[in-house]
Image: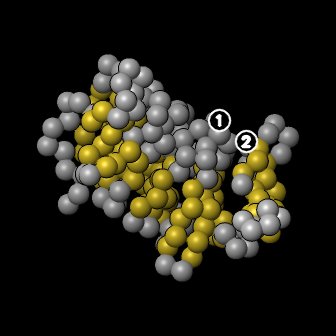
């Protein structure tokens, strides 16, 4: 459990049976609005936080830092995403960054049309971002090469999701609609 405020930043692991604290990690990061995610890679389980100024993966059992990459700034709201050995983080006025779990380093980053609320969507092949002005981008997860951009008349605050190979959104005026205007976009290879 991540608990941040203006004075401190803490990460807690709780025993689900008893609710007792297993470990607590004081963090030097500034407060974050992003929700942590759990990443399982091989036999390693991690909790990943997007926080200012880092994206950090902690060992679920011990709280030890597995990796930490300085790539964020500001009040971080988008949660991290994970696919194919790559942690994806983004925040307005910072960068969209792909962090290799193998090396612990930023593999690539981009600085255009960054989300300020919506979390990125990651698949084995692609990363999709949506910003509050209605701009949606799709990148190759391995290289960061931008595949397409589409501008919508509506803003994007909820995070895009993937279902049955299609990107879905929960918009301001309609719910669970396929992204209109994007025809023939393959999300699987």
Decide which of 187, 73 is in the foreground and name it.
187
Disc with the residue nearer the chain's start (2 vs 1)? 2
Compared with 54, 7 (above or below) is: above
Which quadrant holds the N terminus?
bottom right
Determine contact: label 2, label 1, CB under 8 Å: yes
Compared with 100, 145 (above or below) is: above
Drawn side of residue 147 relative to residue 113, left or right = left
Which residue is at 30% across, 58% downward? 125
x%, y% of residue 170? 40, 32
Is residue 189 visible in the rendered image? The answer is: yes
Q: Callout 1: 10 Å neighbours few (<14), some, many (20+)?
A: some
Q: Callout 2: 10 Å neighbours few (<14), some, many (20+)?
A: many
SS at mark 2? loop
The residue at the far bottom in this view is 43
Which residue is at 70% across, 74% downward? 61
Compared with 62, 27 (above or below) is: above
Q: Which colour scheme appears in the figure?
A: secondary structure
Q: Quadrant of residue 63?
A: bottom right
- The disc placed on residue 143 is none
Decide which of 45, 138 is in the foreground and name it.
45
SS at mark 1? loop
Drawn side of residue 6 relative to residue 50, left or right = right
Is residue 145 visible in the rendered image? The answer is: no
The residue at the far left in this view is 184
Residue denoted by label 1 = 75
Residue denoted by label 2 = 31
Q: CA gap, disc 2 to disc 1? A: 7 Å
Which residue is at 57% across, 56% downward? 37
x%, y% of residue 13? 74, 63
Which residue is at 80% across, 66% downward? 18
């Amino acid at each position: 459990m991540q608990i941040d405020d203006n004075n401190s930043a803490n990460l807690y692991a709780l025993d689900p049976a008893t609710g007792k604290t297993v470990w607590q990690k004081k963090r030097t990061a500034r407060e974050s609005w992003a929700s942590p995610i759990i990443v399982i890679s091989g036999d390693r389980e991690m909790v990943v936080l997007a926080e200012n100024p880092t994206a950090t993966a902690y060992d679920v059992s011990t709280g030890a830092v597995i990796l930490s990459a300085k790539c964020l700034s500001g009040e971080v709201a988008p949660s991290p995403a994970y696919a194919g050995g790559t942690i994806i983080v983004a925040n307005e006025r910072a960068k969209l960054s792909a962090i290799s779990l193998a090396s612990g380093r930023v593999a690539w980053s981009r600085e255009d049309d960054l989300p300020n609320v919506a979390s990125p969507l990651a698949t084995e092949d692609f990363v999709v971002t949506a910003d509050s002005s209605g701009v949606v981008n799709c990148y190759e997860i391995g290289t960061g090469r931008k595949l397409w951009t589409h501008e919508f008349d509506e803003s994007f605050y909820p995070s895009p999701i993937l279902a049955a190979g299609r990107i879905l959104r929960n918009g301001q005026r309609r719910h669970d609609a396929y992204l209109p205007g994007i025809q023939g976009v393959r999300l699987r290879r």
